[in-house]
Amino acid sequence: MHVRTKDGAWNPYFAGALTGVLAIAAALITHLLLGSSKYIGASTTYARASGFILRVFAPDYVASNAYYNKLGLVIDWEFMIVIGIIVGAFISSVAGKDFKVEFLPPLWKERFGPSAAKRAIAAFFGAVLALIGTRLADGCPSGNGLSGMMQLSASGFTFFITFFITAVIVARIFYGRKP
């Protein structure tokens, strides 16, 4: 199996296998070293990060907020995974010689025009919808889908299938079929 595809992207099978190895390693390490049964997830980290930022401006509010108290504002292994994702993506793009700062990807320009403001608004509202869904589901795609499937959880399979089908439908609505 080749690590890269013909166009230089990561082979999805190789990347998927690495994700599986990471999920199993994380589960084993957290169980053996921490005595915890937590699995890979990232959404709680973003909620905690918002608490850290908000605490700078309104410490009393954060201290009295039941949601932040339930989460616990800590930098834990999940927080470090998110930092690792960001750093790893950067290193991978530089190593693969495809790093570039791009406000409007060519596919977006082709479909929706050259407006950076339109893309920023779409990205903001898309992120808000994703955040609401993530918090309502009490977890993100990696937590509910990958970790749930790793445990052979019916809810994990249901979530992942629903997530994938929805992504395909939305991509077809927004981008249509390529000729």
Image (tube, rainbow, N blue to C red):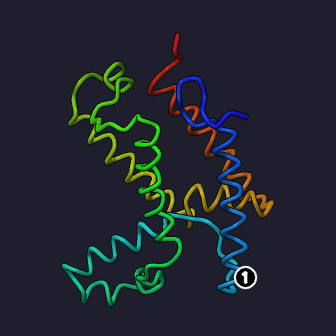
Question: Where residue 116 sits: x, y (%)?
Answer: 22, 34
- Identify the image quadrant of residue 53: bottom left
Camera-nearest residue between 86 and 162: 86
Does residue 139 appear to the left or right of 95 in the view shown? right
**Compared to 173, does 44 lie above or below?**
below
- Identify the image quadrant of residue 41: bottom right
* Residue at 36% from the left image edge and 71% from the top image edge: 49
* Residue at 46% from the left image edge and 24% from the top image edge: 175
Q: Which quadrant of the rendered structure holds the N terminus?
A: top right
Q: Badge 1: how crowded within 10 Å, few (<14), some, or many (20+)?
A: few
Residue carrying label 1: 32
Does residue 29 appear to the left or right of 86 in the view shown? right
Does residue 24 appear to the left or right of 167 in the view shown? right
What SS does tag 1 mark?
Answer: helix
**Compared to 50, does 10 lie above or below?**
above
* Residue at 56% from the left image edge and 67% from the top image edge: 138
Question: Where residue 50 sits: x, y (%)?
Answer: 33, 70
The amino acid type of the residue labelled 1 equals Leu
* Residue at 42% from the left image edge and 86% from the top image edge: 69
In this view, which residue lies farthest toward the top?
Answer: 179
Does residue 26 appear to the left or right of 69 in the view shown? right
**Compared to 54, does 173 lie above or below?**
above
